[in-house]
Image (cartoon, grey):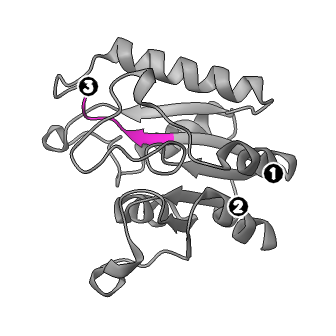
Amino acid sequence: MKIIFLDRDGVINRYPGDNKYVTRWSEFKFLRGVKSALKKLIQNGFKIFIISNQAGVSKGIFSQDALNRITKNMLNEFKKSAIHIEGVFYCVHREEDNCSCRKPKIGLLEKAVKSLGINKIDKKDCFFIGDTLRDVQTGKAFGCRTVLVFSGKEKLANRDKWKIRPDFTATDLCEATHIILKR
């Protein structure tokens, strides 16, 4: 089974900025080409999951209801474009909560795979696409290949400081999709 795990902010929608959050639907802006990229991945047999840390909930910056509304609206927009997302999994905990679901831990990825009702996947057919080194770390810890995109937090100019290396880098989800489909 081929699976794409996607971070949300900075990959699907515009990155809100360091230490900032998308707190309501009006702040959620799809990045250019996201819907066409997801369609291509799905047409090529990939199952799509969104995996995102959203600690703003536990910090009291926005409510679980607000996060649910943003997610519902995002999924409705995908549905209008005939894009099926298998599931959206969030960690709403703070780092100090030391939960098993906060990236770079792999709890959300395990939960996503379990939701498919299968016991085992071939992780070489799985990719984690994210805009932070934390996303790369998560994908590597899970055993899948990683694509770091520069449409959000991380910048190519920081490459010399990276303590972990992605398998691939791309300007955005469109280029990441092209890289994956060439493999």
- 148 sits to left or right of 41: left
Report, in whole angstroms, how far the alpha carbon at label 2 lies from the one at label 3.
Answer: 31 Å
Q: Give yes or no for residue 56 being in the magenta stretch.
A: yes
CB atoms of marks 2 and 1 within 8 Å: yes
- What is the span of residues highlighted in magenta in the rendered image? 51-57
Element type at mark 2: helix
Quarter where residue 133 is shown: bottom left
Name the residue nearer the viewer: 27 or 128. Answer: 27
Can you give x and y, in whole percent of width and height, for residue 29 in the image?
A: 50, 36
The residue labelled by disc 3 is 57
Label 3–label 1 contact, CB within 8 A: no
Q: Which residue is mark 2?
A: 177
Q: Say what amino acid the circle numbered 2 marks.
A: Thr
Give the residue displayed 64% in from the left and 64% down from the top: 176
For the residue carrying disc 3, how many other residues have a C-alpha within 10 Å: few (<14), some (14-19), or many (20+)?
many
* Left or right: where 149 falls relative to 49: left
Classify mark 2: residues with Cα within 10 Å, few (<14), some (14-19) or many (20+).
Answer: many
Indicate whether 16 appears above or below 179.
above
Secondary structure under tag 1 reads helix
Q: CA distance from mark 2 to mark 1?
A: 8 Å
Mark sitting on residue 40: 1
